[in-house]
Amino acid sequence: MKLYHFPPSTNSLKVRIALLEKGLEFESVVIDLTKKEQKDPEYLKIHPFGQVPALDDDGFVVYDSTVIIEYLEDEYPHPPLLPADSENRAHARLMEDYRDNHVNPHFVTLIHEHRKPEEDRDAALIRETQGNIGSAFAVIERDLQDKEYLAGSFSLADIAFMPNIALLERFQVPLDPDFKNVAAWVERLRARASYAATQN
């Protein structure tokens, strides 16, 4: 199994964490986005859209972080990363989609701004984006009411957020101190071995 990824990429991290949680061994193939390696003709044979991550499982290639994790769940069901019941499985998918489309884009904005020289950064955009992230986590606070994890048990929904959790401190994103559910959930995620293994 080969994982084509760029270590700082949040979606690459999402898949790495899922592989670690599944206990699957894989070869790491770094595609350096800063050098435009994702547009190399050889890599485009693997991922026709020139993005990361992509997974080659014994010759079967799958890309898009969400599709990769779903594939891993189907092909390697133990330990499970989706709940057993259909309602919580659907909720896990909904929360992963929320992260992918309504939370992660704000972090991507911060990543792009912080790659610039400090004098070229848009301070107003950074403040606005930090506020948007805070508002997005209000949804998580409500969702975690009376639950340890987003779908009850630890799932791919929580995995999806783990790369973003690591960026909260890095980008000095303040979360509402009243978000007690979020704070406890973040500590649970940070305590997982897969989280620690991807923080280098």
Image (cartoon, helix red, strand yellow):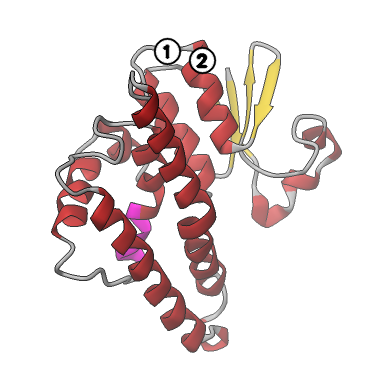
Q: Position of residue 182 (x, y in %)?
A: 21, 55
Instruction: Relative to 17, say whether 181 is above or below.
Output: below
Which residues, given as a range, are shown in magenta? Answer: 165-171
Residue at image location 39% in from the left, 67% down from the top: 133
| Total numbered badges shown on the rendered structure | 2
Q: Amino acid at mark 2?
A: Asp
Q: Tell me the crowding category of disc 1: few under 14, some 14 to 19, or many 20 or more residues within 10 angstroms, Cα based.
A: few
Can you identify the residue that label 2 sits on?
74
Can you identify the residue that label 1 sits on?
77
Residue at image location 15% in from the left, 50% down from the top: 184
| Residue 29 visible here | no
Q: What quarter of the picture does the C terminus occupy? A: top left
Please state which of residues 142 and 11 is positioned toward the viewer in this rendering.
142
Report if residue 167 lies within the magenta region: yes
Q: Position of residue 158 (x, y in %)?
A: 34, 40
Report if residue 160 lies within the magenta region: no
Q: Tell me the crowding category of disc 2: few under 14, some 14 to 19, or many 20 or more residues within 10 angstroms, Cα based.
A: few
Q: Position of residue 168 (x, y in %)?
A: 33, 62
Q: What quarter of the picture does the N terminus occupy? A: top right
- Image quadrant of residue 192? top left
Q: Of helix, strand and loop, which one carries label 1?
A: loop
| Residue 89 visible here | yes
Left/right placement of residue 68 relative to residue 189 reads: right
Instruction: Relative to 192, say whether 62 is above or below.
Output: above
Q: Amino acid at mark 1?
A: Pro
Asked if the residue at tag 2 contacts the one at tag 1, i.e. Cβ–Cβ closer than 8 Å, the answer is yes
Magenta part, dominant SS:
helix
Residue at image location 21% in from the left, 71% down from the top: 176
- Image quadrant of residue 157? top left
Left/right placement of residue 140 relative to residue 9 reads: left
